[in-house]
Amino acid sequence: MKKLFAIILCAALMLTAAALAEPSGLVGSAAPDFTVTTCDGETLTLGGLLAEKELVALNIFTSWCPPCRQEFPEMEGIYEALSDRMEIVAVSAEPEDTDEIIAAYRDELGLTFPMGLASGTGIVEYARVQGYPTTLFIDRDGNVGYYQLGMFLVGEQFKVLADYFLSDSYDGTPATACNVYVCDQDEEPVAGAYLNFCTDTTCETKQSDENGLICFAGKPESYHVQILKLPEGYSFDENYDETYDSPSGDWMYVQVTKG
């Protein structure tokens, strides 16, 4: 599992660098009512989609981008479960991509959500895209609630954000996202660790999965990440308290002691 640790470390470095270049002013603002013609010839508008769905995830990619190709299958699985309430629209920003290329790409990966070309839509210019993939979550009111520059390393990152915006308690507040890797001193994942994500007024408890991962989405506040409980055979500093206050989907490492 050290390979997973290395991949997450690499992703964290890329996201940290990307966060410095994120365009300001998009999150919390109204998205333009863009029009996309899919590779199947269907015409979609943001307004039309939001008349039927509660959330639109707008993904900007290119057919040659390896991280784009890597994240799409994970997104597809979540889309199949939530497509009655949310839509994913993926548009290629590569000038040499054609409808035929995108249709073949979609079929190769077994994707079912709408895909098309960004050319002529104004989407790339609006989103001020600086890398691929770029994903914007547009909420039920047509406002950008989250902006991610870079891929979703695991599908759970995408899912917790979708769940946040689809929640009955969603009040229009943009999301922050925190991703945690819990590992031991040998960088091996620790499953079944309970961590608290606390603000000054509330705490939410999350459990690490079989890969030692926890993905959390909530309101953009300052969170204290605390270790609550570990599986038998592991120990930790009971005073551990890591502050997380970035909205950009950064990765955090929580290392505990085995034995």
Image: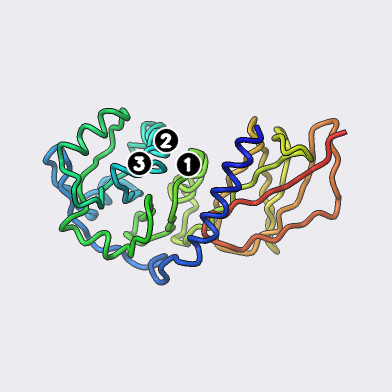
Q: Which residue is mark 2?
A: 78
Quadrant containing the C terminus is: top right
What SS does tag 3 mark?
loop
Q: Are marks 2 and 1 in contact (CB under 8 Å)?
A: yes
Answer above or below: position of 211 versus 239.
Answer: above
Q: CA distance from mark 2 to mark 1?
A: 7 Å
What SS does tag 1 mark?
helix
What SS does tag 2 mark?
helix
Q: CA distance from mark 3 to mark 2?
A: 11 Å
Give the image location of residue 3, x and y in percent.
61, 35
N-term mark: 1 or 3: 3
- Which of the numbered marks, if any, corresponds to residue 159? 1
N-term mark: 2 or 1: 2
Q: Residue at coordinates 24% horizontally, 54% vertically from top-left?
A: 46
Question: For the residues carrying marks 1 and 3, which lies nearer the camera in this image?
Answer: 1
Q: What's the colour scheme? A: rainbow
Q: Is residue 231 left or right of residue 168?
A: right
